[in-house]
Image (cartoon, grey):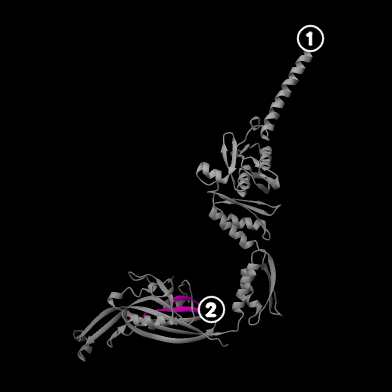
Amino acid sequence: MPIKIKPIILVLTLHILLTSWGFAQSEMDKTGQPAYDMMERKSLSSNSILNNLQFAGADINVVLEEITAKTGVVFIPDDDISGEVTVYLNDIYVEDALRIILDSIDLAYKEEPEGIRVMTAKNFKLRYGYAFNQLIHTKIIPLLHADLDDTVIKLQEVKSSIGKILHNNETNTIILMDSPNKLQEMVNIIQQIDLPIDTKVFTLHHIRAVDIEDDIQKMLTPKDGIMSIDADKNEIVVTDTLTNITEIENMIERIDQKERNVLIKTKIINITLNDEYLDGVDWEGIVSNYVRIDLEDSQEPDEGQTNQLSVGSLSKEDLEVLFDALDTVGTINTSSEAKIETKVEKTVQLPVKSTEIISTANIDEDETALEWDEELKFNVSVRYLDDQIVQVKIKPRIISAYEESNNGGTNGMSEAVIKMEKNSTVVVGGIFKEVIVEATRKIPLLGDLPIVGFVFRNEKERLLKTEVIIFITPEISEDN
């Protein structure tokens, strides 16, 4: 009898195994997919790494099956999803890979207990009330010309805290994942640097090539841009992106011109301010291109004042209107007028002496203004931007008599750059000084007597507050 029992057990065991395999096979046949419930499912948060996922024009369902086979993450695709996927991903978290793939074909996903539900982006918004890519958008950009590693470094400086930048050296591709605004900012950066390289020869006619070598060197694209100079031919050879070459070409055209002279006219006036205008002129509401530049004066500013100069520009017509209006602010006195002829873009120094700061218009014959021991100097240069626009750079310095006599030191100031139309005038205001005026009145002869003369003399001081205004008008000559 024992001999007959063994075959029965073997047959029964084999039948059970075949039945189980057949059931699993029938379940796969019904859906066209593996029986996921029999597999160990992994969630997206399991940090599964996906390697070597490479497809060209593959159906999205095939791609999802491959991801499942590689990572164990189970997908439940809706019946209406479709799309072709072209991608090459390696060493990437499965969650990042899924977002990149689905976002590229307008699909979305939602993690559910049974697996990852995959649906159209439209259905996602209908079901959950918000867009799938509301917070994070993705974009795949192949680089054609720019260096991949250098580009990634530049983009890392821009991305937000929620953003990710992935790259593939084999396909020279960058994958961006970030908020919509940041994503667009990074796309713009790539468009600016991923440009073809070209070479152009510039022949200079009026200036020496070696004189602008440093200027061009600063404009070159790091790593990609190179230049060389042929001093005998007075030529510059530049290899760089087309965009950068165009900028260099514009710069060369602007400065490679016949040398021109500029006549700088200056006029300095001071106004003894009326009591109702002790704060001076409100320049911000009067001039164009208004800026304020700091003055590191050796003295503390008066109460209600700051150590700042007001700088702006006025057209010829507006300047005439200003002169008429200043009469209401106080008594005007023209301290000096001068003309300096120099070369375009050459810096000249315009001194404003203490005697020009202190007005004598309101000082009587028997009064004396106390001396002010500081001098204000302006470094001025004029640049011709085009036929109608002039750029004036102004850098003032204040110098005290003590500093100049000891070490020649100066108190530095910031620089103002004013771009204005031709025939306009730069206006500098906000220079305030309180002038102490000493007055002595006496009876002739008796007031000069020793010992008792003071009885016949009357000595007093009064305070005058003045604002100094400087007008700088450049006139560029078209002749050499």
Task: Please tell me which residue is depicted at 51% across the width and 86% down the height of the picture.
Answer: 341
> Is 168 positioned to the left or the right of 304 in the image?
right
State whether residue 437 appears in this view.
yes
Q: Where 54 falls versus 229 (above or below)?
A: above
Residue 306, quarter of picture: bottom left
Point out the stretch of residues depicted in magenta. 370-399
Q: Nearer the viewer, residue 140 or 334?
A: 140
Secondary structure character of the magenta stretch overall: strand
Residue 383, which numbered label? 2
| Residues packed near mark 1 inside 10 Å, few (<14), some (14 to 19) or many (20 plus) | few
Q: Please, what is the three-letter code of the amino acid marked with disc 1?
A: Pro
Residue 285: horizontal and vertical position, in percent? 38, 72
Which comes sooner in the sequence, label 2 or label 1?
1
Task: Please tell me which residue is depicted at 41% across the width and 75% down the height of the picture.
Answer: 287
Q: Secondary structure at mark 1?
A: helix
Q: Distance between the Cα atoms at labels 2 and 1?
A: 114 Å
Q: Secondary structure at mark 2?
A: strand
Q: Where 351 falls versus 238 (above or below)?
A: below
Residue 417: horizontal and vertical position, in percent? 49, 74
Name the residue tied to disc 1: 2
> Is 391 positioned to the left or the right of 207 in the image?
left
Residue 289: horizontal and vertical position, in percent? 45, 73
* Mark in the foreground, 2 or 1: 1
